[in-house]
Every structure is written in structure tokens, then in C-alpha cells.
Image (tube, rainbow, N blue to C red):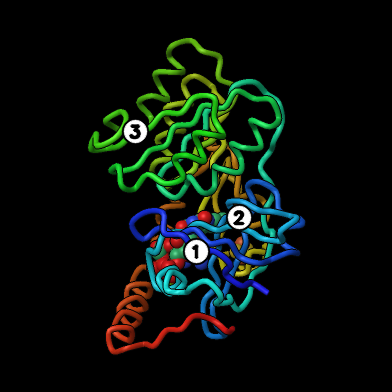
């Protein structure tokens, strides 16, 4: 169980794995996530189920190696197994025929938005995708997102690909052009989702965001993932991760995302030090 069947490097420190997980694949829906552990003493981290194949019994995850656990995960190879994976968790994204939907993805938010975009198109919607990144080499899942969309726009902050600037520029242009937009779905760094919501609010375009708060158990028990939505406390793992972006307190979310920064820094330094000394990392149990 949980064997890594296929490993692909798809960007700088961005990896795509197909993992054997028949029970999760059977029940997975777009917008849901799983929580995995690499070892008995390892922490639990949430990752979106970015694709699934019920027949093959596989789920795909895409992640950026940003700290200790994702770095450790990135060192695993095909044939290695993850210690455990729990899922599918969270409420699936609402998929219905509503008309025109603009999907805005920033960075690895592309992994989260891909199954949603595919499902929305299959449900008969016009799907316009805006994929944004700081620079061209950080654009991921470009071909897959293009295939899932009727219109596809790229933005890079430095202008190395597509439109120069942030993803809110083309978004505003489309909305201001008078085109009827029925929903915007924004997934990426919290700051990007905050600005997408600011851009759509004056036009009263429904805007759904997928929140990435810190999670531990993923089942509504520990409270670590709490967010404020419409002045009420909600648990991202069981009430979300999708929420009405116009009601989310993004500043609180961003503050809470940083609360373990000191511990995370120590953990990655210790891990890199162990690896430099020859950590002999051979992946999980075979
Ligand atoms: P650390 O150095 O420990 O942390 C780096 C930063 O990641 C932290 O500052 C914090 O903001 C965040 N983080 C740390 N621990 C957690 C945690 N337990 N839960 C949530 N965030 C954490 N990332 C992807 O690359 N691909 C995905 O598909 C993806 N899907 C996600 C889906 C959900 C529902 C959530 C909540 C997060 C998702 N993330 C995804 C973020 C991913 O969980 C973090 O990048 C990862 O936990 C970082 O762990 P680390 O030990 O490598 O880094
Ligand atoms: Fe513990 Fe949501 S992760 S309550
Ligand atoms: Mg960590």
C-alpha cells in the first residue's frame, strides 16, 4: 500500500507522484485532500489529491519541497512506500453547471485547481484558466490545465512568459469587459487569494478559495486549522477547504500560517545537516 509508482519532477523543487491507494482513489472527488506521514516520528502533512484513477487504484499528488517533510518526501523514489495516507478528507468542491467559471491558480495551486477545472468543464461550463507564477520556470501543469480549459492565460511577475504582471490583471480585464462571469475559483498563496477576492468583490462575482491553513488531524478534532469566515470560526479540514473568499479573514490566516516558523526552520536545518553527513535516506518501507 501507498507505494510510489511514478515520480516526475515538474518544476524547480516541484514533484508529481502517482501513489497506489485504491481505497482513497475509489472515493476521491475534486477539491479533496489527504494527510500523509512518512515515518512513525514524522509529522502529518496535508496534500491535495490532484488526480485519481479509480480503476488503477492510484492517486496523484503534486507538491513543492518547501520544508522538512516535503523535502524528505522529494527524496523518495519509485518503489518506496509512504507510511500512511488518510483520505479523502474535506468537502468536495461544488461542481455544477453554472455558466462561465474563471479558475485562477498561483504556483502549486495549479495542482489543486486541475481536478476542479476538469470536473467543471465536464459538467458543461465554460472554463477560463489563469495560471500565474513569479517566473516562467515556476509554471506547472501548463499542458494539463490548458486541456481542461476553453481559454487559457499565463501571467508571470517578471514577464518571462505570458502577460507580465500578476494574475489579477487579466482577471479584472475579463470582468470589466462586461463578460458574464458566474464564479471565480482562486487557489494559491493566501496573499494571492486575498487580492483575487479584492478584485472580484466590487463586481459581486462569487469567489471560492481553497484555504491552506495548518492541519494536524484533518478530522475537526485539534483546532489547528481554524479560520474565520464571515465572523465565525470554521475548521478548514471539515468545513472546507473551499470557502466564500469574500468572507475570509486572510490576514488572520496568514498570521496563523507563520506560527511554527521558528520550529520549521530548526527542523529543515537539522534535516539538511543530517543529509550532508550522509543521511542514507532510502525512502520509506519497501
Ligand atoms: P515546513 O517548513 O514545516 O512548513 C512550511 C510552511 O508550510 C509553513 O510555514 C506553513 O505555512 C505550511 N505548513 C507546515 N505544516 C503544515 C501542515 N501540517 N498543514 C498545512 N500547512 C503546513 N502543498 C503542496 O505543495 N501541494 C498541495 O497539493 C498542497 N495541498 C494542500 C492542501 C491543504 C488542504 C492544505 C491545508 C495544505 C496543502 N499544501 C499543499 C501545503 C502543504 O501541506 C505544506 O507545504 C506542507 O505541510 C509543508 O510541510 P514541510 O514540513 O515541508 O514544511
Ligand atoms: Fe485539526 Fe482541522 S486539522 S481540526
Ligand atoms: Mg513541517
The residue under the point 59% across, 36% down is 117
In the image, the residue with mark 2 has its CB under 8 Å from the nearest atom of ligand 1: no
The residue under the point 43% across, 39% down is 194
Give coordinates of residue 182: x percent, y percent. 60, 22
Disc 2 from disc 1: Cα separation = 15 Å
**Residue situated in front as seen by the camera: 143 or 206:** 143
Disc 3 from disc 2: Cα separation = 25 Å
Give coordinates of residue 58: x percent, y percent. 66, 60
Disc 1 from disc 3: Cα separation = 27 Å
How many residues crowd mark 2 within 10 Å: few (<14), some (14–19), many (20+)? many
Pointer 2 or 1: first along the chain: 1
Pointer 1 or 3: first along the chain: 1
- Callout 2: helix, strand or loop? loop
The residue beneath circle 3 is 155
The residue under the point 60% across, 50% down is 241
Q: Is residue 77 left or right of residue 275?
A: right
How many residues crowd mark 1 within 10 Å: few (<14), some (14–19), many (20+)? some
The residue under the point 64% across, 72% down is 2
**Residue situated in front as seen by the camera: 190 or 26:** 26
User: Is 139 drawn above or below residue 178 in the view shown?
Assistant: below
Q: Are marks 3 and 2 in contact (CB under 8 Å)?
A: no
Disc assigned to residue 49: 2
* Quadrant containing the N terminus in the rendered view: bottom right
Give coordinates of residue 286: x percent, y percent. 59, 83
Give coordinates of residue 46: x percent, y percent. 55, 63
User: Is 5 drawn above or below residue 30 in the view shown?
Assistant: below
User: Is 265 drawn above or below residue 179 in the view shown?
Assistant: below
The residue beneath circle 1 is 7
- Callout 3: helix, strand or loop? strand
Q: Is residue 164 left or right of residue 113?
A: left
In the image, the residue with mark 1 has its CB under 8 Å from the nearest atom of ligand 1: no
To which quarter of the image does residue 56 belong?
Answer: bottom right
Amino acid at each position: 500500500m501507498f507505494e510510489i509508482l511514478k515520480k516526475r519532477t515538474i518544476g524547480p523543487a516541484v514533484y508529481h507522484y502517482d501513489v497506489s491507494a485504491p481505497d482513497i482513489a475509489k472515493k476521491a472527488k475534486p477539491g479533496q485532500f489527504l494527510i500523509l506521514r512518512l515515518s512513525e516520528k514524522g509529522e502529518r502533512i496535508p496534500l491535495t489529491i490532484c488526480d485519481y484513477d479509480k480503476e488503477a487504484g492510484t492517486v496523484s499528488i503534486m507538491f513543492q519541497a518547501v520544508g522538512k517533510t516535503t523535502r524528505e518526501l522529494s527524496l523518495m523514489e519509485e518503489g518506496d512506500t509512504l507510511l500512511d495516507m488518510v483520505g479523502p478528507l474535506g468537502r468536495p468542491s461544488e461542481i455544477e453547471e453554472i455558466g462561465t467559471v474563471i479558475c485562477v491558480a498561483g504556483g502549486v495551486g495549479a495542482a489543486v485547481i486541475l481536478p476542479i477545472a476538469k470536473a467543471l468543464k465536464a459538467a458543461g461550463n465554460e472554463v477560463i484558466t489563469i495560471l500565474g507564477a513569479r517566473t516562467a520556470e515556476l509554471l506547472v501543469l501548463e499542458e494539463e490545465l490548458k486541456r481542461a480549459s476553453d481559454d487559457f492565460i499565463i501571467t508571470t511577475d517578471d514577464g518571462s512568459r505570458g502577460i507580465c504582471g500578476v494574475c489579477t490583471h487579466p482577471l479584472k480585464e475579463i470582468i470589466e469587459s462586461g463578460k458574464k462571469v458566474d464564479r471565480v475559483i482562486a487557489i494559491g498563496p493566501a496573499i494571492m487569494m486575498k487580492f483575487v477576492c479584492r478584485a472580484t468583490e466590487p463586481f459581486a462575482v462569487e469567489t471560492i478559495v481553497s484555504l491552506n491553513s495548518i492541519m494536524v488531524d484533518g478530522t475537526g478534532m485539534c483546532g489547528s486549522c481554524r479560520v474565520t469566515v464571515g465572523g465565525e470560526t470554521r475548521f478548514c479540514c471539515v468545513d472546507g477547504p473551499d470557502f466564500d473568499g469574500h468572507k475570509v479573514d486572510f490576514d488572520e490566516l496568514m498570521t496563523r500560517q507563520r506560527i511554527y516558523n521558528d520550529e520549521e526552520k530548526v527542523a529543515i536545518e537539522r534535516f539538511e545537516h543530517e543529509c550532508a553527513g550522509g543521511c542514507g535516506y532510502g525512502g520509506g518501507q519497501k
